[in-house]
Amino acid sequence: PAELLEADFYEFQHLLTDREQQALREIRVFLETQVRPFADDQWERAESPRHLVPRIAELGLFANAFPETARFPNSSVFRGWVAMEISRADPSTATFIGVHSGLAMTSIAVGGSPEQKAEWLPRLAAGEMLGAFGLTEPGHGSDTAKGLETTAERRIGADGAPEWVLHGAKRWIGNGAFADLVVIWARDVADEQVKGFLVRTPAPGFSATKIERKQSLRAVENADIVLDGVVVPETDRLQNIAGFRDVAVVLRLTRADVAWQALGVAVGAYECALAYAKNRRQFGKPIASFQLVQQKLAVALGDITASIALCMRVSQMQDDGTQRDSHSAMAKAFVTARMRETVALCREICGGNGIQLGSQGEVPGDIPPGYSVARYFADAEAVFTFEGTYDMNSLIVGRAITGIAAFV
Ligand code: FAD
């Protein structure tokens, strides 16, 4: 079995197959040697870990969810644990991968024709090109279903083939400043339905500007995008997207992954705090010996344990085809709320040293590089908000409970 994760108190990981556990072990070695030690510096520089793409692709981290590209048959539960492990080492790296393989590739897997899937999924899985997902706009975040303003107008091109012209703006687009392929969601001016377009960059009329001075998930490069008459051939319109309902299918799948990612943020913070509590001495004793510190650790581990159980179940439902929007919305809302409590308690345990990053070769306040709780504390805020805020996911659950949509 994979060596036991201490924070997996009820040993859920043992439910994975031997092959999945072996893959998880291999991924952990990569994360502990190539990602965690450099994560604080990467965060401070606000640069995405693009240099890791070949190894990430080799390990199958872009590819596992899609039958066309998976390295071996695997479950959503396995992929959830992988998302947790990546986030546990570095939430920014988990988001960098999640935007590419979760949002961009899932859009193609859900909305693409067989030809589009065959054209794009293998290349994206191999990391030959990077993807992004453009839904949010400067004026529309939570209300994109109704409010989306980016337009798509169909016309016949000079070569006699149908094509689309895109106008509008997008905001917060992860990987947007360097992605080779950006999925743009736009409203058809003729039938007012939301459609998906694969924009190959660079493209005339397409510009992307990195958003600077972020204070959460700093190693994810988000962009403001402007679409000023970008032309997309009909062959690059996602053929199986009929409206926003299909975008919601993509979000249902990726939200479950984000719940696992949030769990990884909590586990990362918990491990920092536990190590620190055993090491740090006050009043002549390790702070781990104080009742109030133990109580905080017990609350954090309870949050983590409940979150693992919910994540496991939502992924099993994905595998057996019974998962509904409200299931993944509840998982995302619940786990991100528990994550927020956990990172706050864990930061508290680390005292003043809990607000400082570590650094390679330099160990401030007994914090080894990659074990600074401050990064998890800050990163939790973006995870709480993206892929539907806590409020919006709660309202999706509220709609399922009452039959009344409170947000239209
Ligand atoms: P708003 O929608 O303006 O919400 C502000 C507040 O009002 C929130 O607390 C919200 O819950 C609340 N609120 C809004 N409506 C209601 C209501 N009806 N009832 C109760 N409360 C309500 N988007 C992409 O398309 N692609 C990406 O790759 C991407 N990556 C991101 C990465 C990061 C780091 C961040 C921060 C965001 C990213 N986003 C991305 C955007 C993200 O999905 C949005 O930020 C999110 O959906 C919230 O939208 P908003 O920020 O416009 O907030």
Image (tube, grey):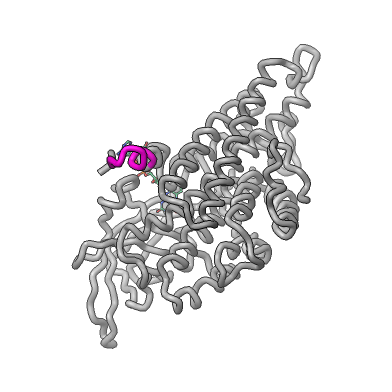
Count of numbered labels shown in the rendering? 0
- Residue 202 in sight here: no
Residue at the (74%, 31%) spot, across then down: 275
Q: Position of residue 194 (x, y in %)?
A: 29, 61
Judge whether residue 112 is colored magenta: no
**From the viewer's perspective, is 36 left or right of 245?**
right
Residue 47 x, y percent position in the rendering: 56, 52
- Identify the main secondary structure in magenta: helix
Q: Nearer the viewer, residue 317 or 130?
A: 317
State which region is magenta.
397-405
In-front residue for pair 87/170: 87
- Left or right, residue 358 beside residue 311: right
The image shows residue 170 at horizontal and vertical percentages of 35, 55
Tell me the residue at 30%/41% (across/down).
Answer: 403
Residue 294 image point, x, y percent: 69, 21
Residue at 59% x, 32% y: name it. Answer: 303
- Taking depth in this image into account, of 330 and 229 the one nearest to the observer is 330
Residue occupying the far left of the picture: 190
Q: Is residue 402 magenta?
A: yes
Residue furthest out toward the top:
283
Left or right of 132 on screen, residue 343: right
Residue 53 shown left or right of residue 4 in the figure = left
